[in-house]
Image (spheres, rainbow, N blue to C red):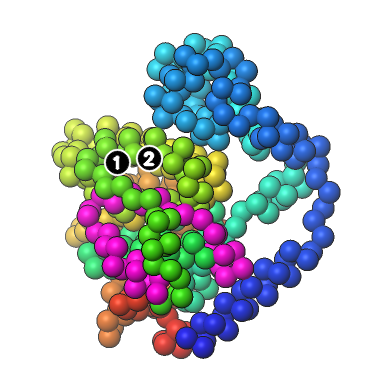
Amino acid sequence: MKHMAEKVKARAKAKAKQREEIEPASSPQTAQREYYKAKYQTLEDLPGVGPATANKLRALGFKTVEALATAPIRFLEQNGVGEDTAKKIVTAARKGMALEYINGLELQEIQKNKLKMTTGCSPLDRLLNGGLETMSITEFYSEFGGGKSQICQQLAVMVQLPEAEGGLDGGCLYIDTEHVVRPDMFIRIAKFRGLDPDEVLKRIIYAEAYTSEHQAELLSNADEVIKVNNIRLIIIDSLTGHFRAEYLGRENLAPRQQKLNQHMHKLIRLARAFNAVAIVTNQVSATPDSFFSKDPVPVGGNIVGHIAHTRIYLRKGRENLRVAKIVASPFLPEGEVPFRITSTGITGDELGV
C-alpha cells in the first residue's frame, strides 16, 4: 500500500507540472471549433434540423451532435434522410470537431486533448507507456482464463479516479456479452483503492447483450448515455463471442465481417467524439496447421486487426502469473510484462518488475 501511495503522489506531481506549463495561443481554427461546440448543443440547434428530422436521427441512433459529426452521410441517405439535408447537417455538426484539413501544429494542439488512463497495474502501465490512451481502441485477447475480464473490471473502477491519480474522473459503459461481470469484484477493487463502493457502482453503466444484433444496437444507441453520464471508458467484453456463434460456415463469413466492421467503426467514432478510452476483449482460435507459430489467433481476422489500434495478447505463465504482450501498435514498441490476478484486481507490485 505504501508503494502504491508513492506512485499516486508521483502521478499527481507530474500532472501538476503539466498544468503549470504555458499552453500556446489557440489558433483561429481552434477558436472556430469552440464557437460551434457552444452553438450546436442539441440536434435541433443544427441548421435544417426540425422536430421530424431530429426524431428520425434519434431513431437511427444519433442522439447527440458529437455522434452525428462522425456519421457516414451515405448511411443517413440510405435510411430516409435526403441527400442535401444529410450533407448539410453532418457538415454543420463537424464544424465543432477537427474533421477538416489542418496543419501539423494544429494536429499537435489537438493531440494534447488525448489523455492516458492508468490500468492500476504498474507493469501494464509501463508496457503502455503510461496507460491506455483516449480516442483509440485497445484489444485484449487470450484463451479462456487469460485475465481479459479481470482487467476490464479493474479498468471500470480506475477510470473513476481523478486525473491527478491517473484516472479520467468519468464513468464506464460496460457491454457484457458473456455474463462475466460481478458487482462484488467492483466492490473489492473499489475498497482496495480507497473508493466508496456505492459511488463506484453508480458510475458503471451496464448492459448485457444477448445477440450480435442486440450488441450492435446497444452501442449504436449509446451516444446520449455516454454524454449524460460523462462516460470516459467504453468496454465490450467480448467483441466477437456472439458473432462467432451466430455466423457459422464459410458462406456467412462475409456478412459477419461486414457487421463487425460497422460495429467497430461505431466504437471508434464514439471514442473520438467523447475523448474516451475504448476497450474490447476477443476470443481466439487455434491454428494447428501453422508451422512458424503455435500462438492462438484472435477471432475477427483483418477487420478487427486493422481497426484496433493496440493489440495485447494475454497468456498464462509460470506460478499462476499472466503475461501481457503487445503484438501490434502504431505508437508502442513490442514488449511483454508479467502480472498477477488477485482477489482485489490485477497487480504487479509484488513481482518487483
The residue singled out by tag 2 in the image is 219
User: Measuring 61% from the left and 22% from the top, which residue is drawn there?
Assistant: 46
Q: Where is 40 relative to 331, above or below? A: above
Q: What is the x, y in percent for residue 22?
A: 82, 60
Residue 7, by quadrant, is bottom right
Residue placed under numbered mark 1 in the picture: 215
Count of number-bearing discs: 2
Q: Nearer the viewer, residue 141 or 303?
A: 141
**Residue 207 percent location from the top left of the image:** 31, 47
Q: Secondary structure at mark 2?
A: helix
Labels 1 and 2 touching (C-beta < 8 A):
yes
Badge 2 crowding class, 10 Å Cα cut-off, few under 14, some 14 to 19, many 20 or more, is many
Say which of 174 and 327 sits in front.
Answer: 174
**What's the magenta region?**
162-191
* Disc 1 residue type (three-letter): Gln
Based on the picture, tell me whether residue 202 belongs to the magenta stretch. Answer: no
Q: Is residue 111 above or below residue 117?
A: above
Callout 1: helix, strand or loop? helix
At label 2, the amino acid type is: Leu
**15 left or right of 120 in image:** right
